[in-house]
Image: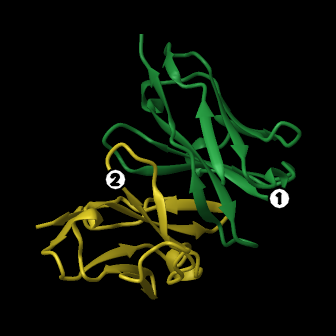
Chain colours: A yellow, B green
Amino acid sequence: QSALTQPPSASGSPGQSVTISCTGTSSDVGGYNYVSWFQQHPGKAPRLMIYEVKKRPSGVPDRFSGSKSGNTASLTVSGLQAEDEADYYCSSYADSSTFVFGTGTKVTVL
Amino acid sequence: EVQLLESGGGLVQPGGSLRLSCAASGFTFRSYAMTWVRQAPGKGLEWVSAISGSGEYTYYADSEAGRFTISRDNSKNILYLQKNSLGADDTAVYYCARVAGSGWSWIFDYWGQGTLATVSS
């Protein structure tokens, strides 16, 4: 199972929006509405930000939103704040009872 | 409060074995599937394995099938990961996570802080 493809980096100024893409195949992203997004600060454990494409766990600001079209999922962070600077990983359930992560995107707040 | 605490990492000789533990508290352990995810230094997240709440069903990444063994002791609320014949590419922080959701909706909602395993002579 190959990793999902994400852009290595993305950036935006405080208050702006940034969107991160996550491209897979019909065997993972395109085949299931089981895409999650995780935020990871340096030296810390990942934190669940979005699950089932667009649902937010309690405690996650509504500035974070998810969507999917075909084999590509997206995470949008609106109203960027300094604390949003982190690595972001998408993930998806995949065929044959496996799970795959994306390659990761480093978000920089300018 | 859900807590997951990994242990068992450290320096391991090439060709040696690794047995990681993840002690869970704050929830009904047997009611949740659990999973292991690893992250090599400076690299991305890599899913390794998962196990059902009862321990009856186990799942592995294609690349790791037959190399890792996941298990759990529901009487002690502990998750395990075992691997033999370690190589340098097994050097990583190993995280355990709780799996919420139903069916194939695997939602990794709580994570431990991770334990670093370094394979080196």
Would residue B99 appear left or right of A101 to someone viewing this image? right
Question: What amino acid is found at the position of numbered circle 2 in the picture?
Answer: His
User: Which mark identifies residue B31?
Assistant: 1
C-alpha span from label 2 to label 1 = 29 Å
Residue B52 vertical placement versus A51 (above, below): above
- Rate crowding at label 1 as few (under 14), some (14 to 19) or many (20 or more) other CA atoms within 10 Å: few
**Depth check, front residue: A64 or B9:** A64
Do the residues bearing badges 2 and 1 touch, measured as CB atoms within 8 Å?
no
Give the tally of numbered discs.
2
Q: Can I make out residue A101 in this image?
A: yes
Q: Secondary structure at mark 1?
A: helix
To which residue does mark 2 refer?
Answer: A41
B121 vs B102: above or below:
above
The residue tagged with tag 2: helix, strand or loop?
A: loop
State the residue at coordinates (60%, 50%): B61
Q: Residue at x 66, y 53 (%)?
A: B2
Q: Residue furthest bottom?
A: A69
Q: Residues within 10 Å of mark 2 (few under 14, many from 20)?
A: some
Answer whether residue A97 is visible to the viewer in this image.
no
Q: Residue B111 location in percent, x, y?
A: 56, 51
The quadrant of the picture occupied by the N terminus of chain B is bottom right
